[in-house]
Image (spheres, rainbow, N blue to C red):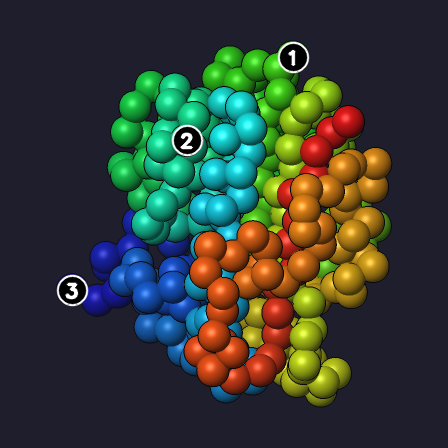
Amino acid sequence: MTEQERAPAGVDATVPSVARMYDYLLGGKDNFRADREAAAQIIQLSPNAKEVAQANRAFLGRAVRAVAEGGTHQFLDIGTGLPTQDNVHQVAARFSPGSRVVYVDNDPIVLVHARALLAETDDVIVVEGDMRDPKAILGHPDVTGHLDFRQPLTVLMLAVLHFIPDDDQAQSIVRTVRESLPSGSHLIISHVTAGELGSDVVGEGKDVYRRTTAGNVTPRTREQIAGFFEGLELMEPGLVSTTDWRPEVALDPSLAGPGGADILCAVGRVP
């Protein structure tokens, strides 16, 4: 059976998917040859790509733990990606039992896997949605029926906003989300920055992503990423690399991998 025959209906296995590329970088197996080849091109351009992806995933766990231990019981994960170890609801359940979680994505394969593997209890649901239309997500009847927007909740947008090429649109998306959150809520964001990459290499990386389902990738500066948290109180240590956000063990520099792009992250609290 060919990869295309194994792909869910409506999925073109010959077009790389950023969700499946990310799965490959994390060491997963839910990917096709086109995804692996595109990811290999990114590794050539940014040799630390696997380490960056793994650090971003580890940040998810630490950030969810931090807000869950603070009393948060509701989570909205926009741009879920393919399930892997320590998904949001699993971390939340350990530190805030009874938490309610909504996963949102628009990738058909992600939705198939998420509905099969993530919706393990009545506390977890999966909704199809596109972050480019945040009002539709926030107003989706399944979302509003599962989460109480009168009570504090946490919204996660991890490694997704850099797939919005227009700066104003990216800021507008986040502003819409921020303005929907009641006092005491949290917004967790991680976003690619160029790091040590030169403009020529960034351009080549954009060319790779133009051939994916996302169509583009736009690294942003620290100042641009900080703008997503306007009006929010940043939890310590503020806006930092994912490896530096409350690491559970000190990172050995010799294990950090070769240089390249980086992902900045922060957790903001609505005053």
Say which residue label 1 marks.
150
Image quadrant occupied by the C terminus? top right
User: x, y percentage for residue 21?
Assistant: 43, 65
Decide which of tag 1 and tag 3 comes sooner along the chain: 3
Asked if residue 109 is positioned above or below residue 165 in the image, the reply reads above
Mark 2 Cα-neighbour bin, 10 Å: few <14, some 14–19, many ≥20: some
Mark 3 Cα-neighbour bin, 10 Å: few <14, some 14–19, many ≥20: few
Which three-letter amino acid code belongs to the residue tagged 3?
Answer: Met
Say which residue label 3 marks.
1
Mark 1 Cα-neighbour bin, 10 Å: few <14, some 14–19, many ≥20: few
Mark number displayed over residue 95: 2
Instruction: Name the element at disc 2.
Output: helix
User: x, y percentage for residue 193?
Assistant: 69, 67
Asked if residue 76 is positioned above or below residue 80 in the image, the reply reads above
Q: Residue at x 58, y 82 (%)?
A: 259
Mark number displayed over residue 112: none
